[in-house]
Amino acid sequence: MSVCIVGAGVIGLSSALRLLETRPDIRTITIVSEQFPQDQPINHTFTSPWAGAHFRPFPHRDSDYASDKRESEYTRVTYNYFKRKSKQWLSEATVEFMNGIDWLENPSIEYQRLGAGYNGSSLEKFQQQDSNLPAGVTFGCSYETWCLNAPLYLLFLYDQVMKKSEQQNVNIRVKRIKLEKLKDICELYPDVNIVVNASGCGLQWEGGLDPKCFLVRGQTLLLDVGDKHDTIPYAHATITHQAKSGDWTFVIKRPGKNGKKAYYILGGTKQPGDYSVMPRDTDTEKLIGRGKKLFPELLENFEIKNVNVGFRPLRVGGSRVELEFNKSPDGEQMPVIHAYGLGGMGFETSMGVAYHIQKLYNNVFSTSKL
Ligand SMILES: Cc1cc2nc3c(=O)[nH]c(=O)nc-3n(C[C@H](O)[C@H](O)[C@H](O)COP(=O)(O)OP(=O)(O)OC[C@H]3O[C@@H](n4cnc5c(N)ncnc54)[C@H](O)[C@@H]3O)c2cc1C
Ligand SMILES: *[C@@H]1O[C@H](CO)[C@@H](O)[C@H](O)[C@H]1NC(C)=O
Ligand SMILES: *[C@@H]1O[C@H](CO)[C@@H](O)[C@H](O)[C@H]1NC(C)=O
Ligand SMILES: *[C@@H]1O[C@H](CO)[C@@H](O)[C@H](O)[C@H]1NC(C)=O
């Protein structure tokens, strides 16, 4: 089989790795993408390198139960995938398990009742925190989670895909191109049997983007805290504070590879429909002001290494992970697996999405044909 994956973000690369891990029938993998993890500087239209990134579970909302449940399940698959990996793998991948803490000033009913996806039966070391909460916080919980260094993790994934292909004698083609429409793949690579559409916001078969997709701007600060990088409390805990005003303030460790120096992400804004790629000083000042109150040890002695601006690819009604058949120019039916619109959760859902893609792949090319 010859598989073409559109997109080299966390979703495209995780899918490539998962397919290589499970499908010996694949003889050729083609990764077609406008951007790649090695690119410097990082383009703002490429979301993955700008992420925190940590796993922050949420309780399912009644209003969006089906998509919440599916996405929450993806996060558990990713968590378990990381859990099963060896210490060595994790440290090369920059994945670190640690305490996750949520502080809310105005928790929704779903949080208050510790509903599905957010309780001790679905999270490890889950605990409610009633004392020592910051002023204004009325709800606190902690659980086991992980943080990773997004740019380094992407390079690691890319490397794993290359290594696995070589080991398994799979022919790998990497092509940098901006596709006008997904259909163009049929002309570029006539041998392709199936396409995975991991283009972030979803490039359409005939061109254009999924009209249900939209971007939410996120500005964060990359902080260097000097010698204290492995002794401040945030070396072992990632915290998210949700204020009554709607502001979110979070600290996420960016572990170094193989135990090297860590940096910290202080975030962040959530600005739908704001396409400004330029860092905004007012956003930076507000973040530092909130951070000083909530995470004093982080902002005791720090240097801003970078002001990051990224755009989360959201989709009305939730992400789309689905199989569809499209007509290629020579009239054949081309299977396309869509995997886009992961919003602010692309890393935490990544391996779950990759497992789902593999299942959809199995539906098209059943294992009995192996
Ligand atoms: C500030 C911020 C903080 C975040 N924090 C977290 C977090 O803590 N945890 C978490 O899980 N997630 C987090 N996210 C979200 C996460 O970054 C995204 O969900 C994830 O990166 C989406 O990955 P993707 O592979 O779908 O898209 P992308 O990374 O955008 O990749 C899309 C790929 O498709 C290619 N492509 C697109 N269009 C075309 C085309 N026409 N032709 C060719 N190639 C094309 C691109 O070049 C790229 O390689 C955060 C995001 C932001 C902005
Ligand atoms: C980033 O990507 C966009 C979208 O393709 C492109 O228009 C822009 O020129 C790129 N920016 C840089 C600095 O390369
Ligand atoms: C706790 O979470 C699990 C798994 O998501 C769910 O099945 C269960 O109903 C939840 N418990 C409560 C009390 O909602
Ligand atoms: C890829 O994703 C987009 C989402 O915008 C979807 O609408 C489109 O149909 C997908 N591409 C293909 C080949 O169908």
Image (cartoon, grey):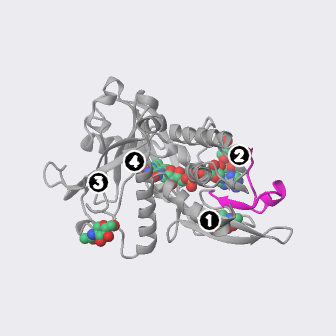
Q: Are marks 1 and 4 in contact (CB under 8 Å)?
A: no
Q: Element type at marker 4?
A: helix
Label 1 vs 4, first from the N-terminus: 4
Residue type at mark 4? Lys
Q: Assign the N terminus to one quadrant of the image.
A: bottom right
N-terminal of the pair, mark 2 or mark 1, is 2
SS class of the residue under badge 3? loop
Q: What segment is highlighted magenta in the picture?
A: 170-198
Q: Secondary structure at mark 1?
A: helix
Circle 4 Cα neighbour tier, 10 Å, few/some/many (<14 / 14–19 / ≥20): some
Disc 3 to disc 2, C-alpha distance:
38 Å
Reading the image, the residue beneath label 4 is: 83
Marks 3 and 1, how far apart at CA: 31 Å
Q: Could you give the CA–CA distance between mark 1 and mark 4, rounded to whole angstroms? A: 25 Å
In the picture of the structure, the residue carrying the numbered disc 1 is 362
Decide: is 34 above or below 94. below
The answer to which of 36 and 310 lies nearer the viewer is: 36
Q: Is residue 285 above or below residue 347?
A: above
Q: Which mark is residue 276?
A: none
